[in-house]
Amino acid sequence: MKPLDAGTLQLRLLTETDWPLFHELHRHEQVLQYVADPLSDAQIRQRFDERLQPWQAGDLHWLSLVVVEKQSGAATGVCGFHCLDLDVDVPLTAEVGYLFLPEFFGKGYATLALKACLDYGTTLGIKQWQAVVTEGNVGSGRVLEKCGFSLIERQHNGYQIGDKFFADLIYKKTA
């Protein structure tokens, strides 16, 4: 797959050399605040290795793309998607996700990267998109809304981080 153009950003496939970025994203307290409890290094490595698998349209594992600033060459985060169901009676649906280093929060990078992912996925035949956001993650909800997603469901106490329960906010978009 050739890199995706996202204006001031470029999205390229995750490679073995991206381990330090992936590890930092999954260990940084501010990044994980609304994502998950801290993982062990072995758990992070397992997730990383799963995302290195070759990917093709319709795969149920994640297509993981590294988001890079064109001008500086700095890796800012990751963005990607995976298909949810391959039922022939249901339009092809994928779940999106993204994580960015805190120094790149608030710069519009998640919106640019997500739009590029959505455009790419749509060319592959994905008809519906979904995202799950932990309640309180206002920035992520804004990113999704800027990309045409709508909040369609709130699952109370859907997710636990530490000793606190949060609602899962389910966002959807039709291509």
Image (spheres, rainbow, N blue to C red):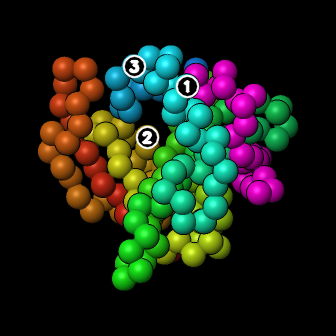
Q: Earlier in the sequence, mark 1 or mark 3?
A: 3
Q: Is residue 152 left or right of residue 75?
A: left
Return the x and y of residue 5 as percentages of the image width and height: 77, 55
* Label 3 CA crowd tier, 10 Å (few <14, some 14–19, many 20+): some
Q: Is residue 169 left or right of residue 98?
A: left
Query: Any magenta on residue 139?
Result: no
State whether residue 51 is above or below residue 116: above
Q: Start and end of the magenta stretch?
A: 1-23
Q: Earlier in the sequence, mark 2 or mark 1?
A: 1
Q: Secondary structure at mark 3?
A: loop
Q: Which of the two residues, 174 or 92, is positioned nearer the viewer here?
A: 92
Q: Of circles 3 and 2, which is in front?
A: 3
Return the x and y of residue 32 as percentages of the image width and height: 42, 26
Q: Earlier in the sequence, mark 3 or mark 2?
A: 3
Check disc 3 and give the amino acid type. Pro
Q: Secondary structure at mark 1?
A: helix
Q: Identify which residue is drawn at 14% across, 45% down.
A: 156
| Residue indicated by mark 3 | 38
| Residue indicated by mark 1 | 45
User: Which of the numbered marks, if any, corresponds to residue 109?
Assistant: none
Q: Is residue 103 left or right of residue 97?
A: right
